[in-house]
Image (cartoon, grey):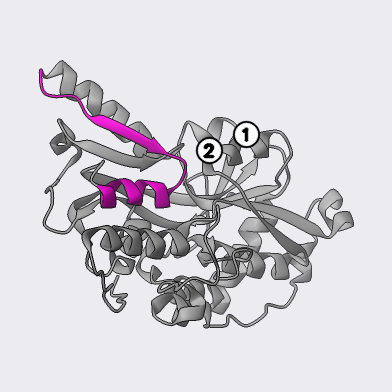
């Protein structure tokens, strides 16, 4: 990504940490923060988040053929509830009002709903609570940068809408990590419930079996907390989906840097409980957005146009006709 902000202006070492924590947390944390604070990364304050959030995506027309695929229970309600963890920019994060969830997934979800003839309600949830919430019927679908994995497919279906891997980032001038094998002996901060947590757990076992130092895995409730661990020196490196890692680096005013190579490129999808009946209308709606150009505009708006798919995929495969 080529997003840039004006550098932070710390007056002391303590203020440097506080400034960066405020910048990253307000960009990506849905758990609080003072909306009236000097938010250098929020849509209201200028910079890349402002230009993205200020880019309007034209409203979509309902497609009768797509709307006809929507299960009756959702047509009767007229709404679909989407769960997102609003701490993962640019996919989803809180606007400066502290209440509105913005980002790629909210934009795409709204457009999908318009094509299906449904109102979309975005619910902010901890990431590791989304899948249980889908299983319990608390949410209808999940849009939160989900990796489409075999394990998750046991209880969910995925309508895939972009591809990408994971990337390492650390404090500028800090540790250099090229691959997962380089994590032995390092302190690694990740968000709870992510595939990156699984990756580091598996790598720790490899380190120990090879007689090397173990990985100090630090699991945090959201990415903003993992960033704070880097800033404060409690962690050496963090790992996130590549678009998210790149966004954190760009928003940090030069305090963070990507390190090493992207790994584990996979499909990312909209998650729906098996048997919900939502896969067909979501796939058809996404296909409509891909064909009319709105999908590309949304990805470009949030800086990840290079991750696009040429057609929707269901559970990593072409949909059956």
| Place of residue 70 in the rendered image (x, y in percent of width and height, measured from the top left) | 77, 55
User: What's the residue at 52%, 66% (across, down)?
Assistant: 103
Label 1 neighbourhood size at 10 Å, few (<14), some (14-19), many (20+)? few
User: What's the residue at 59%, 38% (across, down)?
Assistant: 129
Question: In front: 319, or 231?
Answer: 231
| Place of residue 82 in the rendered image (x, y in percent of width and height, measured from the top left) | 66, 53
Question: In front: 187, or 243?
Answer: 187
Local SS, label 1: helix
Disc 2 and disc 1 in contact, CB within 8 angstroms: yes
| Place of residue 266 in the rendered image (x, y in percent of width and height, measured from the top left) | 37, 48
The correct choice, above or below, for 23 with respect to 152 in the image is below
Q: Is 144 on the left or on the right of 281, as rendered?
A: left
User: In the rendered structure, does residue 307 fall within the stretch colored magenta?
Assistant: no
| Place of residue 95 in the rendered image (x, y in percent of width and height, measured from the top left) | 55, 69
User: In the rendered structure, does residue 226 fall within the stretch colored magenta?
Assistant: yes
Q: Is 19 on the left or on the right of 222, as rendered?
A: left
For label 1, the residue is 132
Magenta residues? 211-232
For label 2, the residue is 128
Q: Which quadrant: the N terminus?
A: bottom left
């Amino acid at each position: 990504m080529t997003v840039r902000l004006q550098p932070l202006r710390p007056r002391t070492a303590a203020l440097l940490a506080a400034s960066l924590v405020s910048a990253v947390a307000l960009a990506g944390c849905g758990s609080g923060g003072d909306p009236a604070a000097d938010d250098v990364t929020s849509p209201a304050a200028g910079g890349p988040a402002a230009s993205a959030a200020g880019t309007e995506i034209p409203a979509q027309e309902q497609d009768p053929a797509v709307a006809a695929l929507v299960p009756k229970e959702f047509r009767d309600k007229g709404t679909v509830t989407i769960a997102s963890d609003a701490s993962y920019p640019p996919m989803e994060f809180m606007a400066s009002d502290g209440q509105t969830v913005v980002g790629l997934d909210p934009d795409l979800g709204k457009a999908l709903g318009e094509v299906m003839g449904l109102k979309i309600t975005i619910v902010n949830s901890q990431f590791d609570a989304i899948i249980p919430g889908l299983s319990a019927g608390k949410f209808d679908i999940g849009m939160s940068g989900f990796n489409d994995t075999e394990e998750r497919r046991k209880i969910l279906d995925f309508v895939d809408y972009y591809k990408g891997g994971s990337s390492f980032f650390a404090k500028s001038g800090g540790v250099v990590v090229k691959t997962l094998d380089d994590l032995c002996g390092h302190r690694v901060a990740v968000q709870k419930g992510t595939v990156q947590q699984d990756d580091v757990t598996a790598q720790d076992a490899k380190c120990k079996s090879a007689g090397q130092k173990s990985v100090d895995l630090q699991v945090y409730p959201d990415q903003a907390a993992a960033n704070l661990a880097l800033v404060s020196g409690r962690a050496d490196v963090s790992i996130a989906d590549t678009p998210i890692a790149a966004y954190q680096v760009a928003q940090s005013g030069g305090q963070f840097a990507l390190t090493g190579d992207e790994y584990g490129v996979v499909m990312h999808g909209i998650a729906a409980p098996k048997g919900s009946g939502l896969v067909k209308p979501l796939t058809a709606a996404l296909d409509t957005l891909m064909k009319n150009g709105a999908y590309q505009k949304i990805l470009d708006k949030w800086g990840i146009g290079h991750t696009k798919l040429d057609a929707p995929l269901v559970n990593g495969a072409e949909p059956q006709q």
